Amino acid sequence: MSRNAINVVRESYKDIDDMDKAAAYFLDHVAWDRLGPVPIVTIAQSIGFKLFMHELENNVSGFLLISPDIREYFETDRIIVVNQNDSAEQRKFTVAHEIAHFLYDFDEDKEIVFFSSFDKDNRTDQKEERANTFARDLLMPKDAFCKAARTLSEEGLKYYEIVSKLCDMFGISSNAIAARYRELGLAESN
């Protein structure tokens, strides 16, 4: 992903209500064939991050660290660490969540070191809400999600079956899929 594309996301889509547009623009500028789950690890690597799994406290899903001082240890100045005890789906969400903090909260013109941690208990902070919304929209893009859900519904599948198939398609937990399904008003059409 180019620096220009990152800057467009940062400057053009700042409001939490624009996170679906930000995620769509972001996905348009990364290598994803629109088939299967969003390759969040590849995306993180394409913007310079190395990813690690480590045992963290139960309420911490992960963290992001940007610092020139870590280069000698990690061969990059950007790392994301996810909690190895979380599910694969949660780890994907954490990576997408931390990418949002990189895009919206790290000011390269003013900061040398940036740290952000994803605390599962902190759901009310505006920055955390924006990061969660961006992560949801990045991992379950609105257009692709609606199209897949409608196709499954037209096949006559029941709600449980639709959610289960969407979990497979997007590689996300059933709770996240069900919440997205309701949020987009798809439950009413079933």
Image (cartoon, grey):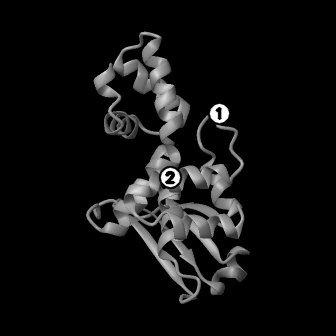
For mark 2, what is the residue?
21
In the rendered view, does 76 fall on the left or right side of 82?
Answer: right
Pick whichever of labels 1 and 2 is earlier in the sequence.
2
Identify the image quadrant of residue 183: top left
How packed mark 1 is, by other alpha carbons closer than 10 Å (few <14, some 14-19, many 20 or more), is few
Amino acid under label 1?
A: Leu
Foreground residue, 103 or 56?
103
Figure quadrant of the C terminus: top left
140 versus 66 height, above or below:
above
The residue furthest top is 156
Is disc 2 placed on a helix, strand or loop?
helix
Identify the image quadrant of residue 74: bottom right
12 versus 110 height, above or below:
above
The residue furthest front is 12
Identify the image quadrant of residue 4: bottom right
Residue in the image at 37% along x and 39% along y? 180
For mark 1, what is the residue?
35
Residue 139 visible from this viewpoint: yes
Figure quadrant of the N terminus: bottom right
Q: Position of residue 73 (x, y in %)?
A: 69, 78
Residue in the image at 58% along x and 83% along y? 108
Residue in the image at 26% along x and 64% along y? 124
